[in-house]
Image (spheres, grey):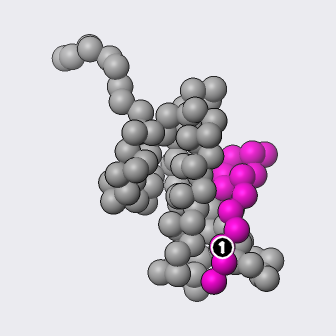
Amino acid sequence: MVVNVSDVPEAKRYEARVEGESKVAGVAQYIRTTELIAFVHTEVSPEYEGRGVGAALARAALDEARAANLLVLPTCPFFAGWIARHPEYQDLVYQSRSRVSD
C-alpha cells in the first residue's frame, strides 16, 4: 500500500491518501510559526488503522519540518510516541530554554 502525504496549509494539516483512492485516510493537524511547528492532533480513519498511515504522516511531516529548519512541539500523543520510538527525529523536538521556576 502506497500512502501519499501532502501539506494543506489552508487547513493547517497534513493529509494522507492511499494511492488510487480519493478519500483522506488520515490527518495531522498543526500550528506553525516561523520557528516551530506544533502537532496537535492526528487521526487515521478506522479502516486504515494499523496499515502505516500514521507513520507515513509523521515521517513526511517531520522530514518537511527538518527541511524547513523548524523545531517540533509534539503535543499530540501519537507524534510524541512516534518520535520517542524513532531517535533519528528526536533532534527536532523543541526544548524550552526558560529558566523560570516557581
Among all residues in the image, which is located at the extreme top? 100
Prevailing SS of the magenta stretch: strand
Q: Which residue is under mark 1? A: 3
Q: Quadrant of the N terminus?
A: bottom right
Q: Determine whether 12 is above or below 86 in the image.
A: above
Residue 44 in the image, given as x and y percentages of width and height: 56, 71
Task: Give, as a three-letter code, the residue at label 1.
Answer: Val
Query: Which residue lies at the image location 44% right of the left edge and 55% below the top edge?
Result: 79
**Residue at 43% across, 48% down:** 89
Q: Helix, strand, or loop for circle 1?
A: strand
Name the residue: 52% across, 81% down.
Answer: 51
Image-quadrant location for residue 66: top right
Task: Please state if 88 lies on the left or on the right of 33 as rendered.
Answer: left
> In the rendered structure, which segment of residues is drawn in magenta?
1-15
Above or below 54: residue 23: below
- Quadrant for the C terminus in the image: top left
In reply to whether residue 59 is colored magenta, the answer given is no
